[in-house]
Image (cartoon, rainbow, N blue to C red):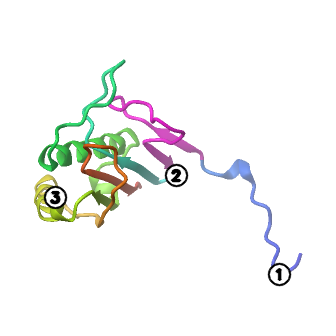
Amino acid sequence: MSELSEPTPDRSARLPKTAVTPPTHTAPPARFSHGVRKGGILQVAGQVGFLPAVAGQPPTPAGPTLREQVPRTLANVQAVLEAGGASWEDAVMVRVYLTDTGHFAEFNELYNAFFADLKEAPAARTTVYVGLPAGLLVEIDALAVLG
């Protein structure tokens, strides 16, 4: 065996990858999952401020304002965390995408209030993103480590 060759991994020994979709969510509009768990890692896909799903109806935003959308978006992330066997205490990274730099202060106020009782806050990154569907002001994803 040369120095550059590595043994071929035994694919049967790999940890299974499981899609996570809470009952409050509709099926994604494309080939992705709301969350994916593999071993002790749970990645929550970007969530937005849609109200819980109603069968046969299109997704409905929680409201037109950041004050309405941020708590709903965080609740949607939490629903995926819980469906994957995690909680906010397991979250090690949160990424926030806002559509307007003018929303940073209000977002931070809402975020701090939501996590007021959290023992240890996850690392976070906030950026401005203009690719959200019309009317949506925030998207949030999270990475959790279990165990």
Left or right of residue 60, residue 107 in this image: left
**Separation of marks 3 and 2 at Cα, in angstroms:** 32 Å
Residue 70 coordinates in the image, percent (x, y) = 19, 49
Outermost residue on the bottom side: it is 3
Left or right of residue 139, residue 10 in this image: right
What residue did someone put label 1 on? 3
**Reading the chain from its start, which is encountered first: label 3 or label 2?**
2
Q: Is residue 55 magenta?
A: no
What residue did someone put label 2 on? 39
Q: Residue at x 52, y 51 (%)?
A: 39
- Disc 2 residue type? Gly
Q: Residue at x 75, y 59 (%)?
A: 9
Left or right of residue 71, residue 35 in this image: right
Q: Quadrant of residue 5?
A: bottom right
In the image, residue 22 above or below residue 114: above
Q: Quadrant of residue 6?
A: bottom right
Q: Give the structural element (helix, strand or loop) at label 1.
A: loop
Do the residues under discs 1 and 3 have CB atoms within 8 angstroms? no
Prevailing SS of the magenta stretch: loop
- Disc 3 residue type? Phe
- Disc 1 residue type? Glu
Residue 98 coordinates in the image, percent (x, y) = 26, 58
**Reading the chain from its start, which is encountered first: label 1 or label 3?**
1
Residue 55 coordinates in the image, percent (x, y) = 35, 19
**Reading the chain from its start, which is encountered first: label 2 or label 1?**
1
What residue did someone put label 3 on? 107
Residue interval drawn in magenta: 16-39
**Separation of marks 2 and 1 at Cα, in angstroms:** 30 Å
